[in-house]
Image (cartoon, helix red, strand yellow):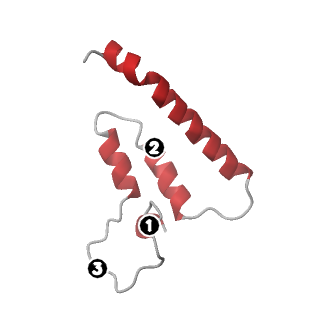
Amino acid sequence: MTKQQVLNLYFLDARHKLIEVAAFLDRVERATGKNDFRLKAFCSALGELNGGRGKARRVLRAFSDPTTRPITRAEGKGAVGASSSRNG
């Protein structure tokens, strides 16, 4: 596809998602309490949007657990979407 075709197909959806991200960050900034590893991972992932190709891979890695050794016990019952070992 040409850039024009990609923009025609995906621009409004991407614009919507970017506004949702901005609204999420506004809500976090207005809230009380401490930041945690998830917000650190999120902000790190946002920083990966600058630069050349491979943005999706870099964003995924910003949320991924870099450790290679198995853990004996999980911290919680479900996935939280970011690694506390990378950003904790």
Number of residues whose C-alpha sits closer than 10 Å to that of mark 2, classed few (under 14), some (14–19) or many (20 or more): some
Q: Residue 12 carries which label?
A: none
Tell me: 34 left or right of 73.
Answer: right
Instruction: Tell me which amino acid carries mark 3.
Output: Pro
Q: SS at mark 1?
A: loop
The numbered dot on residue 47 is 2
In the rendered structure, which amino acid carries the disc numbered 1?
A: Ala
Q: Looking at the image, is 28 positioned above or below residue 21? A: below
The residue beneath circle 1 is: 79
Crowding around mark 3 (Cα neighbors within 10 Å: few <14, some 14 to 19, many 20+) is: few
Give the number of the mark in front: 1 or 3.
1
x then y, percent, for residue 18: 53, 34
For numbered disc 3, what is the local secondary structure?
loop
Do residues under tags 2 and 3 come within 8 Å of each other at their CB atoms? no
Neighbor class of circle 1 (other Cα within 10 Å; few <14, some 14-19, many 20+) is few
Apparent side of residue 68 relative to residue 59 in the rendered image (left or right): left
Q: Where does the image place residue 19, in percent across and percent down from the top left?
A: 58, 33
Name the quarter where the N terminus is drawn. top left
Q: What residue type is labelled 2?
A: Gly
Q: Name the residue under label 3.
A: 70
